[in-house]
């Protein structure tokens, strides 16, 4: 009991010392900078599979603490040496991620810091993006142009983006069709739509390991299903052989879609979670989309 009380007293004394030496301006600035760096690090890890490695590091820290408390000399010595060179190891392991983080910090626009879009602006951007995607898929279906379009949702696809070429362009029917044009250098790969923009193209997707799929499904369809199995992304496929439009989500695939059924599915997946839609607004949007397509024809 005396030992416990002594520990409590030491803790209280340390806490009082910290309070006495507290400088409101400097210490607050210190906390804000530290929190910002942690936030940026979290965003960095959220876009890669480095989170799995961080879980392993957390497990080693817990094992070291337990071994130290139980006075396991051999295990404590081993883990202690691992942590001694841990910073060098982390720098080597995370070298690509650290480089990308520093590059993004250098390209960041300070003037736009804290600037956010309104709900109406975000919805308008989503409407325009989905219109462009649907019209492009309908056009490519008529010409039997193969396409693979990944609509990113909550699961960040940073690892997939790095396999292709970053574009970060405003979506349009012509841009999407040109990217998947047979002689385009980026046609043989997937396009990533992130935050209503054509973020990357020519990306490599993981193939599904499901052996029970229809033998008629080709590489594009299997890559789309594989992507939908490991993330919550919605993947659109345009078949080069048949011109058929398909949609993969949650490991399942819906085939033989037209511009209306494709738009309905995308509305439900990409917009429906944020804002419920009425039948009248859906009908107006679909009529507007059909009118645009008729005008281009």
Image (cartoon, rainbow, N blue to C red):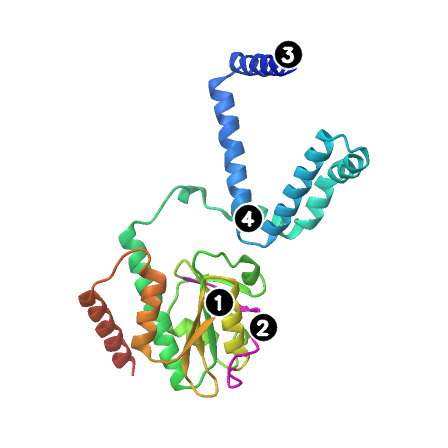
Return the residue at label 3: 2
Label 3 to label 4: alpha-carbon separation: 47 Å
Where residue 176 sits in the image (x, y, percent)? 42, 72
Label 1 to label 2: alpha-carbon separation: 12 Å
Q: Earlier in the sequence, mark 2 or mark 3?
A: 3
In front: mark 2 or mark 3? 3
Q: Earlier in the sequence, mark 4 or mark 1?
A: 4
Question: Left or right: 148 with respect to 278?
Answer: right
Label 4 to label 1: alpha-carbon separation: 22 Å
Main secondary-structure element of the magenta-colored stretch = loop
How packed mark 4 is, by other alpha carbons closer than 10 Å (few <14, some 14-19, many 20 or more), is some
In front: mark 1 or mark 2? 2
Return the residue at label 1: 228
Q: Earlier in the sequence, mark 2 or mark 4?
A: 4
Q: Earlier in the sequence, mark 1 or mark 2?
A: 2
Label 2 to label 3: alpha-carbon separation: 61 Å
Return the residue at label 2: 209
Name the residue nearer the viewer: 120 or 263: 263
Mark 2–mark 3 contact, CB under 8 Å?
no
Q: Earlier in the sequence, mark 1 or mark 3?
A: 3
In front: mark 3 or mark 4? 3
Name the residue nearer the viewer: 149 or 200: 149
Return the residue at label 4: 44
Name the residue nearer the viewer: 81 or 96: 81
In front: mark 2 or mark 4? 2
What span is in magenta?
197-217
Q: On the image, which quarter does residue 270 sit in?
A: bottom left
In front: mark 4 or mark 1? 1
**Image height check: is 109 above or below 77?**
below
Label 1 to label 3: alpha-carbon separation: 59 Å
- Give the mark count: 4
């Amino acid at each position: 009991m005396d030992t416990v009380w002594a520990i409590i007293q030491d803790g209280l004394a340390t806490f009082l010392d910290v309070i006495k030496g507290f400088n409101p301006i400097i210490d607050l600035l210190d906390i804000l900078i530290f929190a910002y760096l942690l936030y940026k690090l979290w965003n960095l890890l959220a876009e890669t599979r480095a989170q799995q490695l961080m879980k392993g590091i957390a497990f080693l820290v817990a094992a070291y603490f337990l071994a130290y408390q139980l006075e396991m000399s051999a295990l404590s010595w081993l883990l202690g040496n691992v942590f001694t060179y841990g910073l060098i190891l982390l720098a080597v392991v995370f070298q690509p991620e650290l480089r990308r983080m520093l590059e993004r910090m250098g390209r960041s626009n300070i003037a736009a810091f804290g600037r956010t879009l309104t709900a109406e602006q975000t919805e308008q951007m989503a409407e325009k993006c989905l219109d462009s995607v649907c019209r492009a898929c309908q056009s490519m279906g008529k010409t039997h142009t193969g396409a693979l379009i990944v609509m990113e949702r909550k699961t960040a696809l940073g690892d997939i983006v790095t396999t292709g070429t970053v574009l970060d362009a405003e979506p349009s029917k012509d841009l999407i069709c040109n990217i998947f044009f047979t002689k385009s250098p980026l046609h043989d790969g997937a396009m990533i739509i992130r935050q209503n923009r054509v973020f990357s193209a020519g990306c490599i997707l993981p193939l599904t390991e499901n052996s029970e799929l229809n033998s008629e499904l080709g590489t594009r369809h299997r890559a789309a299903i594989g992507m939908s199995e490991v993330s919550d992304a919605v993947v659109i496929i345009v078949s080069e052989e048949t011109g058929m439009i398909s949609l993969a989500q949650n490991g399942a695939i819906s085939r033989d879609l037209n511009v209306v059924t494709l738009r309905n599915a995308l509305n439900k997946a990409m917009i429906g979670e944020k804002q419920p839609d009425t039948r009248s607004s859906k009908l107006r949007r679909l009529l507007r989309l059909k009118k645009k397509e008729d005008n281009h024809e």
